[in-house]
Image: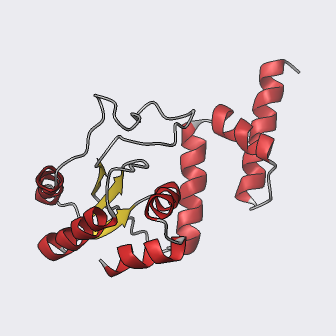
């Protein structure tokens, strides 16, 4: 058996195991993701969707990602987006700029916003809470905002617990 035939047979076996809802190890998942045909992955995903939603209705959400700031004190190795506090290329969008982006999303049928912006020590808790309140009162859209790391950064910057930060944001 050639290497290509062995690889194909092995991937087919992994796909069969997935179809049977068997557990795969991390390295097996990695092989499936990198080596399986897109059509095979699509079929498996659609089969799983059909198990949970047999009515053959598939929906999607139109939303928009808004990066309200690129200023971040974390300096992650994987992020090429951030700028350190004080960097000339750092930015914070104004509320009006954010509102404009939301309105563009609503014009094309969008209903939600994902907002992320790093760990910016220059923004106050009031900046965040006022923004969220304004977005809700103006547009009534779904807000999916702030990563766990951003909550961590806010808690550190504002000297608050995670629970207190989340409570303030939720109340806004």
Q: Is residue 101 left or right of residue 147?
A: left
Say whether residue 143 is left or right of residue 55. Answer: left
Of the pair 2 and 165, the residue shown nearer to us: 165
Quick check: 108 above or below 5? below
Q: Residue furthest top?
A: 2
Horizontal side of 66 relative to 150 (left or right) equals: left
At x 89% / y 21%, what residue is drawn? Answer: 1
Q: Residue at x 49, y 66 (%)?
A: 159
| Residue at 34% across, 65% down | 125
| Above or below, 91 relative to 50 | above
Q: Nearer the viewer, residue 43 or 81?
A: 81
Q: Nearer the viewer, residue 137 or 47?
A: 137
Task: Say whether residue 70 is visible.
Answer: yes
Q: Quadrant of residue 167?
A: bottom left
Q: Position of residue 96 (x, y in %)?
A: 11, 54
Q: Position of residue 24 (x, y in %)?
A: 79, 52
Residue drawn at 45 percent across, 73 percent down: 166
Residue 168: % across, % down: 38, 77
Is residue 59 in sight in this rendering?
no
Quarter-of-image position of residue 23: bottom right
**Residue 133: where, in percent of width, then height?**
22, 73
Q: Is residue 154 above or below residue 170?
A: above
């Amino acid at each position: 058996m050639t290497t290509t035939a062995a690889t194909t047979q092995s991937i087919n076996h992994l796909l069969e195991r997935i179809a049977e809802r068997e557990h795969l190890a991390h390295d097996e998942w990695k092989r499936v993701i990198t080596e399986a045909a897109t059509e095979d992955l699509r079929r498996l995903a659609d089969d799983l969707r059909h198990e949970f939603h047999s009515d053959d209705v598939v929906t999607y959400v139109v939303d928009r990602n808004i990066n309200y700031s690129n200023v971040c004190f974390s300096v992650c190795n994987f992020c090429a987006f951030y700028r350190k506090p004080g960097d000339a290329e750092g930015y914070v969008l104004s509320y009006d700029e954010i509102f404009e982006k939301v309105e563009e999303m609503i014009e094309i049928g969008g209903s939600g916003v994902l907002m992320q912006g790093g760990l910016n020590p220059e923004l106050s808790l009031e900046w965040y809470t006022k923004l969220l309140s304004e977005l809700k009162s103006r547009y009534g859209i779904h807000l999916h905002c702030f990563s766990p790391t951003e909550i961590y950064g806010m808690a550190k910057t504002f000297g608050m617990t995670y629970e207190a930060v989340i409570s303030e944001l939720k109340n806004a």
